[in-house]
Amino acid sequence: MRSDCGQPAPAGSATTGFDDLPGVSAAVAASAAATAFAGVSTTAPTQRRRWLEAVAEALHSRAELLVALAEEETGLGEVRLRQELTDAAANARYYAAVGEGGGWLRAQAQRRTGGSAADLRKAHLSIGPVAVFGASNFPFKFGVFGHDTCAAVAAGCSVVVKAHPAHPRLSRAIAGTVTAALDAAGAPAGTFGLIEGFTEGLALVQLPEIAAVAFTGSQSGGMALVDAVRARPLPIPVFAEMGTVNPVVVTPGAAHSIEPIAAGFVESFTRGGGQFCTKPGLLLVPRGCGAAAAIAAALSSRDGVRLLTAGISDAFRAGVGDLVAAGAEVLATGGPADGEHVVRPVALSVSPDVLRQGSRLLQECFGPVGLVAEYGHFAEVGEILSRMQPALAGSVFSADGADPDVSSVVAQLAGRTGRVVVNDWPTGVACVDAMHHGGPWPATSRPDATSVGADALARFTRPVAFQNVPDEALPPALQDANPWRLVRYDQEGRPW
Ligand code: NAP
């Protein structure tokens, strides 16, 4: 249904071929996904790899149109969007290869030997149709065909995506591209579906066909879905990846060369209009190191930035006002803010005393704002970090060579974030096996899960043990003939 979201194409904008397609309700899309699931989950991972690769290819072939639409609806800039589309297609290929590798199935066997009574086999099975909610700020990588959709299909699940209202035409054009490519590659009808509208999104997570929810967005949105799912007769897992204040600590040893750090901070908290979940939100520096002047100098050359929507720019202005009301002071602002949804980037200074647990200062303000706090003694850093909400990522800048303060900060950040970074900025998330993109609540609703990297598939599976089950009744991953050609070992370490 497009009732509370659909918009006609603006005059003069590109024709996508998908603007006039009738939308479907959550119920229809979930039913189609449930029908498709049997076929998707029993298809060999090698074949699912071909489906995802076909979509990656199709995205490339429509790149001109998709990037033009994305620019029209988000204003994130053609260069950035072209790169993001390229990355999203590469990510699809990555998840396709991870899926084919089969490690995520974790097939294990305690096979009956002479004396043992039972034949036990265990594997992670595809969980069922997955509802995906993407974020506004990465229309390709965390959107309709982003990490969640690709990981779910690679793990043998069908998917229903709730389109983000910040880019409805792009969402439809990507969905049309995905559906056509999956059909041509032989995927079952209903493997992928798109719905639109706030109420349809809420209805989707209530439907009995849906087996898991993957969400990327704000804390309020993520927690609303967690609550909505709790009200179901049969609860299901909700993997909500949300937004946090990501701390960056500058040790006393690193503060001797503060200019490049200050410039990097400004570059990092204004990149993409500050609309990154991994934006460095709070910089902790030694008192009197000159950071304030260096940040002001770096920010003075920055122009105003267009944010994604009127709602996001209004929320940003209100949020900065709230931060000032909570005790922050304006340290510096960037250039003029003329134009639709355009705001001035701003750096705020705060005293460590006002950084109290529960303060608005320690909650995300989405957009180009960064907070700076000066500590007196290094021991204060630990106290401030312990008062912060757990976060997606945290950084520490250290002195060249051995720095006695690094280990303690790394240990503290490891206890409170999903990713610890040394001498670099947290902005940007590589899609590789060793990545973890998550963190303790409220960074996510599931501290055990990542939405990026090989382990992202694990969210869409469920382990099942099979005891004394005849070979022909086992799932393919556990059958003696190994039809999916997995690398598997039995209890004695023998390939099986
Ligand atoms: P958002 O406003 O939470 O929206 C995300 C999706 O959830 C939209 O489809 C939205 O639909 C839906 N939604 C929001 N509130 C809802 C509710 N109460 N009930 C049902 N559905 C709801 O987030 P956004 O503005 O797109 O993205 C910005 C936020 O995402 C920032 O906080 C950023 O830090 C975070 N983010 C996190 C990550 C990560 O990986 N952790 C990545 C990117 C962005 P409607 O608009 O129709 O309500």
Image (spheres, grey):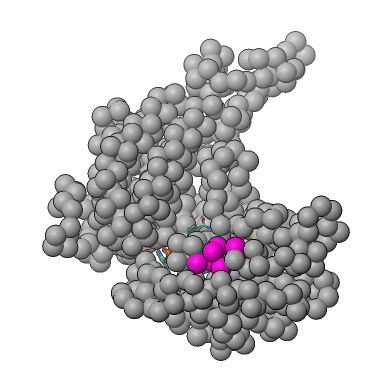
Q: Residue at x 58, y 51 (%)?
A: 437
Count of residue discs: 0
Viewport quadrant of the N terminus: bottom left
State the residue in front, 210 or 414.
Answer: 414
Q: Residue at x 50, y 85 (%)?
A: 321
In the image, is residue 269 part of the stretch drawn in magenta? yes
State the residue in front, 186 or 15.
Answer: 15
Placement of 339 over or under 329, stated as above or below: above
Give how far across and how far down residue 227 sits, in percent.
49, 65
* Residue at the far top in the pictured view: 114
Region of the chain picked out in magenta, as a range: 264-270
Q: Is residue 236 left or right of residue 257?
A: left
Q: Quadrant of ligand 1?
A: bottom left
Q: Examine the image and state in which quarter residue 363 appears.
A: bottom right
Q: Is residue 19 left or right of residue 106?
A: left
Q: Residue at x 66, y 15 (%)?
A: 495
Give how far across and how far down residue 260 sits, in percent.
64, 63
Q: Examine the image and state in which quarter residue 191 appears.
A: top left
State the residue in front, 318 or 451.
Answer: 318
Give how far across and how far down residue 274 sits, in percent.
49, 66
Viewport quadrant of the C terminus: top right
Q: Is residue 7 visible from the viewing direction of this image?
A: yes
Placement of 13 over or under 387, stated as above or below: above
Task: Give the overall secondary structure of the magenta segment.
Answer: helix
Q: Is residue 284 left or right of residue 105?
A: right
In the image, is residue 68 part of the stretch drawn in magenta? no
Give how far across and how far down residue 188 sits, in percent.
30, 32
Q: Examine the image and state in which quarter residue 38 appears.
A: top left
Q: Is residue 34 visible from the viewing direction of this image?
A: no
Q: Residue at x 75, y 67 (%)?
A: 255
Placement of 342 over or under 36, stated as above or below: below
